[in-house]
Image (cartoon, rainbow, N blue to C red):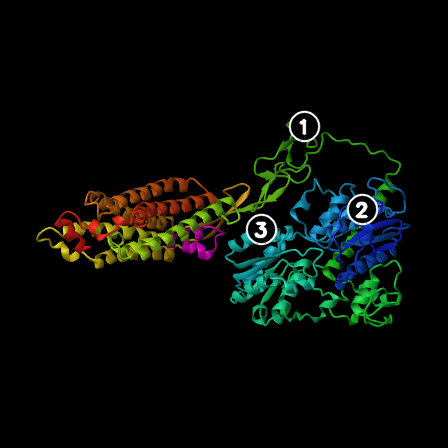
Amino acid sequence: MSDPLFIPHEYYLAGNLIIGGITSQLITYFEELLFAEDPKKKQIGEPIMQLKNYQHVLALVFALNEVNNNLKILPNVSLGCHLYDSYFNAKLTYQNTLNFLCTLKRIIPNYRCDTQNNLIAVIGGLESEISLHIANILSIYKIPQVTYSFFVPAMKDKSKFPTIYQMVPNEESQYRGIIQLLLHFRWIWVGIIALEDDHGDRFVQVLMPLLSQNGICPAFIHRFQILTASEDMRDIFFTSRPREILSLLQNKTEVKVCVTNADSHTMMILKWFLYLGQMEDMSEAVMGKVWIMTAQWDFSLLAYEKVLNIEVFHGALSFTVKYQEVTEFQNFLHVLHTHWPEEDGFLRVFWESAFNCLLLDSKLDGDPGQCTGEEKLESLPGPFFEMSMTAQSYSIYNAVHAIAQAVHAMYSARHKYRKMVVPLSVCNDNCHPGYSIEKKEGESFCCYSCTLCPKGKISDKKDMGDCFKCPEYEYPNKDQDQCLPKILNFLSYGEPLGVTLAFLASSFSLITVLVLGIFIKHWNTPVVRANNRDLTYCLLISLLFCFLCTLLFIGQPQTLTCLLRQTTFGIIFSIAVSSLLAKTITVVLAFMATKPGSQIRKWVGKRLSYSIVISSTIIQAGICAIWIFIAPPFPYIDSHSMTKQIIVECDEGSITMFYCALGYIGFLATVTFIVAFFARKLPNTFNEAKFITFSVLVFCSVWLSFVPTYLSTKGKHMVAVEIFSILSSSAGLLSCVFFPKCFIIVFRPNLNCKNHLVIRNKFISKSLKCL
């Protein structure tokens, strides 16, 4: 690329050895580059600066001064630096990384046309995505990269990125700290906020199992969309996106705590959304919340964000990387205004933005006056600039010293063995990761063989004496030299199986509503009135809720849904089956009551049918109440049953009570089948016992096959089996009992008349009166 996009901001300090750096302090927007256009015509526009991040540049330069002034570290060698910015843009990050390798501003990979740029390492970046972009280039050339961001899973693959080093501890330790903090204050109903990117996915993926395991429930999970380079932050006022989080906070008034994956993008968007809430009289939604921030949080404001009211974040809690105060750094900052290095291409933008003034020869337009040069950094508020070294600056400071010590060790080794050839003298080759040492019988301990790690264990270093198991929520990779995070296994709306079952449940619910509408419209016709119209309505409504209750089984198990799943299903199905039983008994008693001198006539009527339905339902409700009282269902995380997945499921609490509830439904269905079977030969005009017999036979067949299938499956497939059983059995009842009647009502209305029903003999006529 002989004419790359012009980069106006850089900091170059000469030295024998050069440390590169990619900072993240400038936000700029420019038009999209089209393939047919000359990129030179698309210059970067006026940047917006995150003022607080300018301290990262100063911390690096300060560390270089310390190293160069210490003759014990690198005598006769000076360290310089070459700094670019990421502009929070992948394309410019890649270009600036390539600029380290080609100092003549002509990007020609694998070709070095000068010797002035002796690059030894690169420090960066602020966020994991930026670090990953840098690593994609530097790993090809085996140039060390020291990052002060948290790693995304891809960056932990040492086979792809062998030269990347992290200055901050493993981020997962802070997740356990968040859990301990929430438990300490008994905050068990919280909101989760993260960005819609890889790091946000990792945040949610790791945090959610920990929350469930410790009895903490997420009231909501909101994911911010990433702003594209062409979007102005102020444009979010004119979109519907702010209303999403604001409406969540307003509707979930009981949620007092929000856990936020507080990277710079998330905080940039969040502070504007909350400010918008205050502007639109939604202060109740945003004030009074406790914000818990992850360690990468560093609250900073842009120059034009001085209007923001940051009181909403007062009382926020944040984890931080451990660091020490560097007292000399403040002295270094105090003399900055008296000595402006010409090499610093970032200082002009910082100074003009921070103090709202113009330096000489400035190209900015506007009303601000000339800068006097006497402006004081200590006069700036904390959200714009801090005089004390921040945790991120401290990581950069340590990175410079770590590189200097590594170079010192390298030079010391070269000097010691400059004129020596060092041969290898070993009994055998090293055992690589994925293998462990096995002593050879009868030989010295220096001689050993390498044994592949057994299944389920790994070794991640050379010559390990034994392999070890991965942590509970991780599993070994194929080479058994690294642990990978397990994924959550539950039936969700985001997968084809969950979508299909939800679609079937919705479809059957609509069909049931349609059938109910037909029966209500033709409520006074003989077909509807036959066999107790009220029981028909009760059965249809219960079948509607049977279909809808399956939606409780889809989605990640929570405490409430686990309590409602089986109990709701058991009670609603009891109502449906007892309605069938009541209809069948009513038919039988009605025909028995027509016999001369029968005493059964007084039992025939709506009171009996209501009693059957209510008493049957009360018994099932009692079983469920006992179940919830002695051992209620609860969310459970099973990390052992599957190798690569964590099963998130509802533990039934008491499996005995689960089968009691299911067995009671089976008992009602069996009684209904027996009664309907003996009543199937009664006169056809009024009798629906044939249809009930067949429908209950389908019902029982489904649930008899359910039990062994349910016991032989795990995870989301076990839940899918139960949903399918509920849908198929309910659909069997709906189709067998009501579709024949609907056919007559809709397509053969001539049969749905009193003249057709009043037939043949007095016996049937008397039965009609009893019904």
The outermost residue toward the front is 750
Tell me the SS state at disc 1. Answer: loop
Upstream in the sequence, badge 2 or badge 3? Answer: 2
Q: Position of residue 100 (x, y in %)?
A: 82, 48
**Residue annotated with mark 2:** 98
Tell me the SS state at disc 3. Answer: helix
Q: Amino acid at mark 3?
A: Gln
SS assignment for the magenta stretch, majority: helix
Upstream in the sequence, badge 2 or badge 1? Answer: 2
Above or below residue 443? Residue 71 is below
Q: Position of residue 415 (x, y in %)?
A: 88, 42
Residue extent of the magenta highlight: 550-570
C-alpha separation, residue under disc 2 versus residue under disc 3 = 34 Å
For image coordinates 76% across by 58% down, the residue present is: 28
The outermost residue toward the top is 442
Q: Amino acid at mark 1?
A: Glu
Check disc 1: other Cα within 10 Å, few if <14, some if 14-19, many if 20+: few
Residue 552 forms part of the magenta stretch = yes
Q: Position of residue 32 (x, y in %)?
A: 74, 52
Residue 229 forms part of the magenta stretch = no
Q: Amino acid at mark 2?
A: Leu
**Residue annotated with mark 1:** 443
**Residue annotated with mark 3:** 205
Closest to the camera, between mark 2 and mark 1, is: 2
Q: Position of residue 333 (x, y in %)?
A: 82, 65
